[in-house]
């Protein structure tokens, strides 16, 4: 009996211990949830960077100075419409949404025909929302549209990830315009099923205002009361003030002299709310505030300015800093896809694998606002004038190539000298380097900038001609080596010149922000090949070949290294081109052993570069390292990457002038193999290394086209150091 009582006592004590442990565990989690900081994303859409200088704004600039300020790249999976922009932020990947993102409602709200939104949502999804939920009615179509994209996207990535971690999200506000719901705010906070844990997006947030276009605007008193209700219900809350969106929609209906006044009134109300909200948050402690404008205004888009301002304050953000991220590696610029992993990271939640953005980091700036405005001015200049200047250059190249081929076929050496074709052909090769040097002049006026390119090109052409007159091929060697040397040194010292060159990438477009772009990749590889061919033509031998091999290894490493050139397509291109050309230079017969060694090199060098990238950790990996991890997780993703590259190449080949240059160059060369009869055979016998170098440039062109997503551009630029020097020599020796 005593034994039974003892066992009963032990059982009771064990139960009490388990209950106590469970209560402590639950209580500890609840306490942790209470102590966890909040992230509040305040959406003031259609803002421009210039608005930050508007004197009516007081609180927003103050918050920028108290935290970090940056430029937001607003690219989406389609056009820069608000629905896609909001969905992209919520997904952490470039998403697409047409009107599907606008139709969100409070679960209890009545929609067309008196039906409750919750009932309609259940009919469409099979899910039964709670009364406090916000529902995205078109979630099924939204999911299907994003499934059709050539890259993986999880709509509602933030909300889905937070819910999995037991953290709630909420949304507040709308941008309803006239009778049309514009409630894409829910796509930032929703989960993958189209539900937001709590929120308020109904028309009760609006107030009649006969002076405001459309007759209604945000009722900030009601909005504030809803904030007070929601702030303790979620750790992530998105608030859309709405009025800037409504006013921008009405821009065409308002007289030009009236619009600035209406805009300032709207900014003043938004600024007051931002200040009040900031004061209610614990920005000096656990809370963080993100002020973001997902889409540029209509006027800004028409002017080519696709950047919008983004501010992050509180939660330990150092004051007076500028924003950056591993996605851009550009001090002052972040991607909209970086906001999702930044929110999750602050809340100690691991981002989803489909999120291609990276957490934002904060860099100390000498003068925060001046740095941002100067950066925006420089990138806007490149964006607005890049296409025009490159198109003019390519027309110039086309005209010279056609003229040179015709004069060679007709054996008109005299006319070539009269027209000055010899220095003009050399000038074609000088322009990419001139575009690299002109930013050093510090001018952002189109006339002086163009004059600078012409002047630097003329000086380089003159120097090339001087070397060429002293010793044949010395000019080609000089021009090739100075181009390669400048590109390599800039890539190794932070890409200062590459980031500013109009011949390089466009940060506003968002295709590339760092490293060596495809334009200069083609130039770099072909210049290295032809410069080496010139050196061997003057001094051949084993030591020269060994030096060239080392030289090419350096070029390959810099081009592919994730912290330098970061161009994986360029890495593959250079490995193929250099391997084939070196075999030709060395006079090695292509047997099966040579084939095995070549294939091993083709696999080994890229594998080493990729391995180096993977060792850098997820926070510092380049885009091709992340793509490899994506393929390792899902091998089918490789097909998506290949199809995307092929689609881009096909599009560029059909619609860009680069394809005309490529076609003209290849067509001209094919003609020269047959007319004049024997001219190519004579060239091959007199300049065997140059002929082999030319074959190397052809290999570069083919490889660049196959291995790069803008292969047409890379292939065309690869011919810049292949076709003009060949035509130059043909013209010089035509008799």
Image: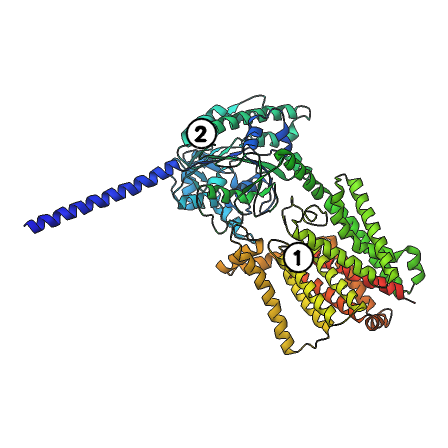
Question: How many other residues sit within 10 Å of disc 1, few (<14), some (14-19) or many (≥20)?
Answer: many
- Residue 216 seen: no
Q: Residue at x 62, y 24 (%)?
A: 55
Residue 216 in the image: state x and y as whole percent: 54, 25
Q: What residue would you read off at disc 1? A: 649
The answer to whether 88 appears left or right of 716 in the picture is left
Of residues 528 and 124, the one nearer the viewer is 528
- Residue 547 seen: yes
Foreground label between 2 and 1: 2
Q: What residue would you read off at disc 2? A: 227
Q: Residue at x 72, y 47 (%)?
A: 502
Query: Which element is circle 1 on?
Result: helix
Query: Which element is circle 2 on?
Result: helix
Q: Examine the image and state in which quarter residue 231 appears.
A: top left
Residue 149 in the image: state x and y as whole percent: 55, 52
Q: Examine the image and state in which quarter residue 521 appears.
A: bottom right
The answer to whether residue 169 is above or below residue 398 is above
Of all residues shown, which one is farthest toward the top? 210
Of all residues shown, which one is farthest toward the front? 543
Q: Residue at x 61, y 74 (%)?
A: 596
Residue 183 in the image: state x and y as whole percent: 51, 36
Q: Earlier in the sequence, mark 2 or mark 1?
A: 2
Question: How many other residues sit within 10 Å of disc 2, few (<14), some (14-19) or many (≥20)?
Answer: some
Q: Distance from label 2 to label 1 (Cα)? A: 49 Å
The answer to whether residue 58 is above or below residue 658 is above
The answer to whether 76 appears left or right of 495 in the picture is left
- Numbered badge on residue 122: none
């Amino acid at each position: 009996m005593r034994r039974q009582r003892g066992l009963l006592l032990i059982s009771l004590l064990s139960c009490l211990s388990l209950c106590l442990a469970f209560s402590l565990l639950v209580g500890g989690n609840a306490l942790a949830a209470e102590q966890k900081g909040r992230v509040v994303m305040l959406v003031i859409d259609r803002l421009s960077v210039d608005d930050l200088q508007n004197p009516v704004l007081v609180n927003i600039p103050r918050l920028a100075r108290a935290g970090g300020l940056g430029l937001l790249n607003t690219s989406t999976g389609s056009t820069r419409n608000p629905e896609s922009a909001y969905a992209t932020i919520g997904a952490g990947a470039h998403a697409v949404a047409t009107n599907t993102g606008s139709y969100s409602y409070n679960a209890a709200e009545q929609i067309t025909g008196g039906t409750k939104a919750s009932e309609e949502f259940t009919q469409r999804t099979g899910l039964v929302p709670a009364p406090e939920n916000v529902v995205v009615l078109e979630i099924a179509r939204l999911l299907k549209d994003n499934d059709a994209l050539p890259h993986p996207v999880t709509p509602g990535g933030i909300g889905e990830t937070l819910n999995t971690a037991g953290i709630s999200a909420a949304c507040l506000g709308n941008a309803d315009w006239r009778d049309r719901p514009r409630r894409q705010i829910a796509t930032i906070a929703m989960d993958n099923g189209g539900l937001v844990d709590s929120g308020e997006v109904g028309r009760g947030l609006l107030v009649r205002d006969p002076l405001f276009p459309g007759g209604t605007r945000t009722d900030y008193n009601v909005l504030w009361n809803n904030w007070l209700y929601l702030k303790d219900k979620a750790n992530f809350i998105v608030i859309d003030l709405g009025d800037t969106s409504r006013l921008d929609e009405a821009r065409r209906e308002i007289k030009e002299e009236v619009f600035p006044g209406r805009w300032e009134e709207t900014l003043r109300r938004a600024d007051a709310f931002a200040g009040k909200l900031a004061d209610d948050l614990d920005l000096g402690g656990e809370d963080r505030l993100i002020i973001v404008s997902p889409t540029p205004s209509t006027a800004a888009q028409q002017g080519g300015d696709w950047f919008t301002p983004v501010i992050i304050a509180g939660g330990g953000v150092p004051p007076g800093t500028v924003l950056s991220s591993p996605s851009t590696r550009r001090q002052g610029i972040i991607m909209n896809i970086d906001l999702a992993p930044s929110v999750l990271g602050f809340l100690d939640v691991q981002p989803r694998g489909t999120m291609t953005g990276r957490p934002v980091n904060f860099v100390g700036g000498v003068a925060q606002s001046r740095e941002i405005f100067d950066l925006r001015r420089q990138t806007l200049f490149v964006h607005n004038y890049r296409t025009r200047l490159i198109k003019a250059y390519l027309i110039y190249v086309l005209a010279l190539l056609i003229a040179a081929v015709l004069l060679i076929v007709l054996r008109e050496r005299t006319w070539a000298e009269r027209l000055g074709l010899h220095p003009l052909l050399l000038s074609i090769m000088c322009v990419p380097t001139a575009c690299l040097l002109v930013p050093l002049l510090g001018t952002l006026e189109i006339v002086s900038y163009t004059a600078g390119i012409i002047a630097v090109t003329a000086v380089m052409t003159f120097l090339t001609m001087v070397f060429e007159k002293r010793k044949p091929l010395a000019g080609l060697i000089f021009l090739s080596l100075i181009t390669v040397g400048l590109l390599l040194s800039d890539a190794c010292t932070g890409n200062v010149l590459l980031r500013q060159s109009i011949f390089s990438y466009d940060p506003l477009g968002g295709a590339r922000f760092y490293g060596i772009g495809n334009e200069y990749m083609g130039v770099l590889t072909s210049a290295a090949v032809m410069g080496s061919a010139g050196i061997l033509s003057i001094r051949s031998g084993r030591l020269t070949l060994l030096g060239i091999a080392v030289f090419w290894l350096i070029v390959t490493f810099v081009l592919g290294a994730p912290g330098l050139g970061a161009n994986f397509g360029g890495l593959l291109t250079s490995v193929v081109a250099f391997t084939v050309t070196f075999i030709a230079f060395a006079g090695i017969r292509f047997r099966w052993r040579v084939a095995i060694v070549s294939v091993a090199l083709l696999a080994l060098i890229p594998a080493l570069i990729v391995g180096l990238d993977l060792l850098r950790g997820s926070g510092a990996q380049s885009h091709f390292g992340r793509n490899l991890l994506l393929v390792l997780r899902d091998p089918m993703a490789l097909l998506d990457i290949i199809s995307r590259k092929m689609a881009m190449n096909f599009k560029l080949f059909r619609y860009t002038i680069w394809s005309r240059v490529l076609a003209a160059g290849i067509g001209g060369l094919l003609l020269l193999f047959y007319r004049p009869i024997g001219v190519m055979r004579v060239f091959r016998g007199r300049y065997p290394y140059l002929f082999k170098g030319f074959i190397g440039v052809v290999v570069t062109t083919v490889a660049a086209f196959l291995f790069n997503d803008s292969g047409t551009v890379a292939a065309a630029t690869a011919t810049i150091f292949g076709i003009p020097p060949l035509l130059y020599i043909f013209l010089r020796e035509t008799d």
